[in-house]
Amino acid sequence: MDFDNLHAVEVVKGPAHWIISFAAMASPCEIHTECDTEGDAKQLASLAYAETTRLERKFSRYRDDNIIHAINTGHGKAVNVDEETAQLLHYAEQCYRLSGGLFDVTSGVLRKAWTFNGQETTPDLELIASLCEIVGWEKVEFDRSQIRIRPGMEIDLGGIGKEYAVDKVAQLVFDQSQKPVMVNFGGDIRAISGDSSSKPWSIGIEDPRKEGNSLGLIELRMGAVATSGLTHRFCIVNGLRLGHILNPRTGWPAADMPRSVTVVADFCLEAGFFTTLAMLHGKDAERFLKDQGVTHFCRR
């Protein structure tokens, strides 16, 4: 892909590294890299943007020309999947089993019952109950080459797709440049610094209660950071603030969720899984994270 034709991508020289920025996956996307020249930075920008847009087109539920659309409109018939899709679905299946059913990529259909615009709302109890009938990975037939879902069910990879893209793009850019890189897609981050002589990346954890304040600083040489929170997407029900992360068992947001949860892990997919699962544990979120032994920041 020719960088000169990428009008949506910006490449600027920062104090210590190049910064590549564009918008994708409903998020601001930045890639920080210590490559040598502007030409190298532009080449990496083209590579990163191409991979990001490829993954968005392939796995977005908003499109009508990709594998997710084919699965969701299969009308109960088996749909063949390629190896990359099979790997991501297998990961989703593992998350479902490890979480005891709390992390479920079939639960996206529950969005039809909720609007998280910060306003007072009255949930439609009958609609929620009917949608819960078509939620549950245990209803899915998947054998790594084909997947079959019941009519009305949907696969929504929104809970892992961006994290997967962060990991893929970071590794792709590092493999191409062999230089330290940090990828940040809307707060989901993966850093690769290469050898031990490289400086770690400094990542600030924003306080969701006060813009501009920090909860702490992470020095990250190799690893990932993901954050889930209620700052922007929530609704009010009977005076209670409810976040956008829905419990697939009940169809409702988990009660007493923290304002935000940030987790540090080896990969962004792993960090994202823990942040979402912690939010679904509600008032027990911090105890859950401590039990898992993961580095985390939890703000109520």
Image (cartoon, grey):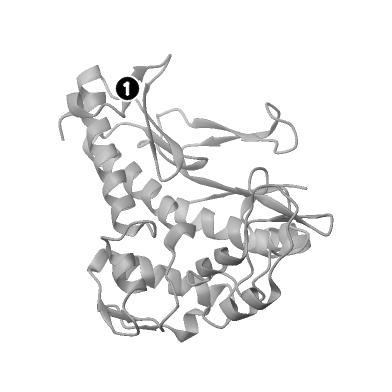
Residue 3 x, y percent position in the rendering: 20, 27
Residue 29 x, y percent position in the rendering: 42, 36
* Front residue of 175 and 130: 130
Q: Could you tell me if residue 157 is visible in this image? A: yes
Residue 75 x, y percent position in the rendering: 34, 81
Q: Residue at x 31, y 78 (%)?
A: 74
Q: Is residue 224 left or right of residue 168?
A: right
* Front residue of 286 and 74: 74
101 relative to 60, above or below? below
289 relative to 136, above or below? above
Residue 34 x, y percent position in the rendering: 34, 25
Q: Could you tell me if residue 37 is visible in this image? A: no
Q: Is residue 236 left or right of residue 278?
A: right
77 relative to 3, above or below? below
Q: Residue at x 24, y 29 (%)?
A: 6
Q: Is residue 3 left or right of residue 17?
A: left
In the displayed image of the protein, which residue is found farthest to the right? 239
263 relative to 143, above or below? above
- Residue hosting label 1: 11
* Front residue of 278 and 152: 152
